[in-house]
Amino acid sequence: MVKLTEWDSSKYLDSEEAIAEYLKAAFEDNDINHITRALSNVAKAKNMTELAKKMGVSRTGLYKTLSEKGNPEFTTILKLINALGLQITIAAPKS
């Protein structure tokens, strides 16, 4: 019998470039659930505890906010992106 394990993309987010491209793709989908899941995977890859400290929130609270049932506020998303050392860029759609 073949034993399968669940795919964990956080294990492959091992560079700033990989993280930026991963999040860029998630935001391009315009799906808040996809964005939240991607942010959660990045937070796991970058050490959830350290990010929570940088953001001024509890580790448990951050896990809960980024869970499937979580509903992060935009301020929380901005704090997380800043804690990751990233920035959001707005661009006009490509023609």
Image: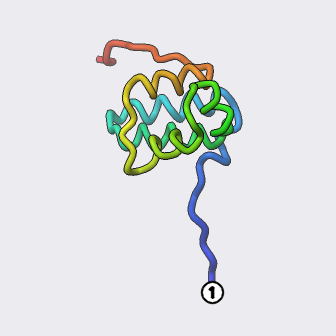
- The answer to whether 15 is drawn above or below residue 34 in the figure is above
Answer with the quarter of the image where residue 36 lies. Answer: top left
Residue 30 in percent (x, y) is at: 32, 33
Residue at x 62%, y 33% (from the top left corner): 18
Outermost residue on the bottom side: it is 1
Residue 92 in percent (x, y) is at: 32, 13
Residue at x 60%, y 33% (from the top left corner): 52
Answer with the quarter of the image where residue 44 lies. Answer: top right
Circle 1 is placed at which residue position?
A: 1
- Name the one closer to the observer, 71 or 90: 71
Residue at x 31%, y 18% (from the top left corner): 93
Q: Is residue 29 left or right of residue 9?
A: left
Residue at x 60%, y 72% (from the top left corner): 4
Residue 61 in percent (x, y) is at: 51, 41
Instruction: Give, as a three-letter code, the residue at label 1.
Output: Met
> From the image, which quarter does the N terminus lie in?
bottom right
- Name the one closer to the observer, 48 or 21: 48
Residue 32 in percent (x, y) is at: 34, 38
Answer with the quarter of the image where residue 6 lies. Answer: bottom right
